[in-house]
Image: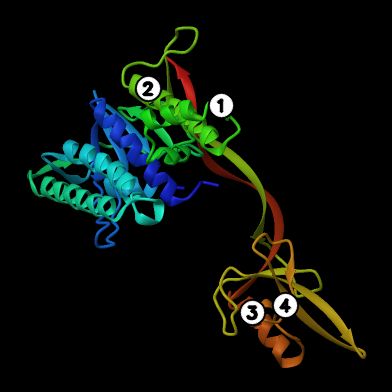
Amino acid sequence: MSSRTNYYDFREAKVLIAMELSKRGWEIFGFKPDESDGMTDYWSPADWDGIATKNGYVVVVDCSDYMVKWRSGKKDYHRSNSKENMELSFEVQSKIKKLEEIRQDRGASPAEEETAKKKIAMLLAKVKENNNTGVNIEVFFPTFQANPPRMSWHVEKDGVIIAKGNGVAKFSDLYYFNEKDAKEELKQYADDKESYRYKQAESRLKLHKQFMTFINKIDTAAGSMLAKDGKGFVYENVVETKYKTENKAVECAGSFKDGQCFIVKRSLTGGVYSGYVYRIHEENLNGKIYFTAYRLDKKLKKELTGRANPGNNFGYMSGTYLDRIKGFFEKGILAYCEIQEVKTPYEVTKCVKKAI
């Protein structure tokens, strides 16, 4: 999901993957067959949550932490004929798409168009009948983890990632692809290799070959992974501690003077909240001394002098108002501080290859 391409490309690509994995003996979780009805303009396309298992291995496609939270190890329901539903659903989609092209504005006769409509109705009725048969079987999603950073799929076993990659969404272009038709089209336009039809068929066949290679990679991963030198390897998540340099307000002894910083310990009125840091400035106006204090940004580098937010400054401080502000330091509402550059640790999770 998902540029991380768009949601629709990922949905169609995932359905294709689920269909092919199902043929190869993978148990598919979270699959919804196509329930659209072209006769009534009802649109409810096929969808898949991206989880399948085989021989204790789990393939995870386009899954975020959100999906892990709501699906990993959680209850689900399968139809007893779910595999047949998947195959029938996809087969019917392809047939209906071809039949919808048989229209009078495309050169068909009224009788041919009417026959096509009747066939579409029969196909939809067959899908409906198939969906109404079978019973719900209670199952549980396998436990799995989200895809590694910048990856759109992975295969794991017992919590260890053994294969991973990306580039899933492009396979959505094969959603209505028919290999036999593409090969016939390639022959038909062989004398005009610069034509759109020839190039399209050639491109789709090339993409289909890549798709089958991708499926084979997933399928063979449900056994053992071997590097080119014949040695086995797995992938695992490794947490590294890194450090970033940032400014931090550290309380210290101080006095109310030009350049001195202070931090708000308890929120005040006028948009002045706890944690805000200000820097004091001394001003001279016609021989009269007064003070101002501007809030620092989150990085504690830049002063916020804009007037849109009343909490950005303390205004003109002098006389009794200045005495009141100074009293806040004695009460612990404000505290003097200095800006120090510190190194803050943070954790980064990386997926690395490990020899076995």
The residue lying at 45 percent from left, 7 percent from top is 230
Q: How is the image coloured?
A: rainbow
The span from disc 2 to disc 1 (Cα, nearest Å) is: 34 Å
Task: Find residue 118 and report its horizontal and vertical position in percent.
Answer: 20, 52
Q: Amino acid at mark 4?
A: Gly
Q: Amino acid at mark 2?
A: Asn
Task: Tell me the quarter of the image containing the C terminus.
Answer: top left
Judging by the rendered image, the residue that carries numbered circle 2 is 216
Whether residue 264 sits left or right of residue 48 in the image: it is right
Judging by the rendered image, the residue that carries numbered circle 3 is 311
Q: Amino acid at mark 3?
A: Gly
**Frontmost residue, 253 versus 294:** 294
Question: Quick one: label 4, few (<14), some, or many (20+) residues within 10 Å?
Answer: few
Which numbered mark, 1 or 4, is in the foreground of this view?
A: 1
Judging by the rendered image, the residue that carries numbered circle 4 is 306
Q: In the figure, 136 relative to 355: above or below?
A: below
Quarter assignment of residue 257: bottom right
The span from disc 3 to disc 4 (Cα, nearest Å) is: 10 Å
The span from disc 1 to disc 4 (Cα, nearest Å) is: 70 Å
Quarter assignment of residue 38: bottom left
Whether residue 27 sits left or right of residue 67 in the image: it is left
Which numbered mark, 3 or 1, is in the foreground of this view?
A: 1
**Frontmost residue, 127 versus 19:** 127
Q: Circle 1 sits in a helix, a strand or a loop, which is it?
A: loop
Which numbered mark, 3 or 4, is in the foreground of this view?
A: 4
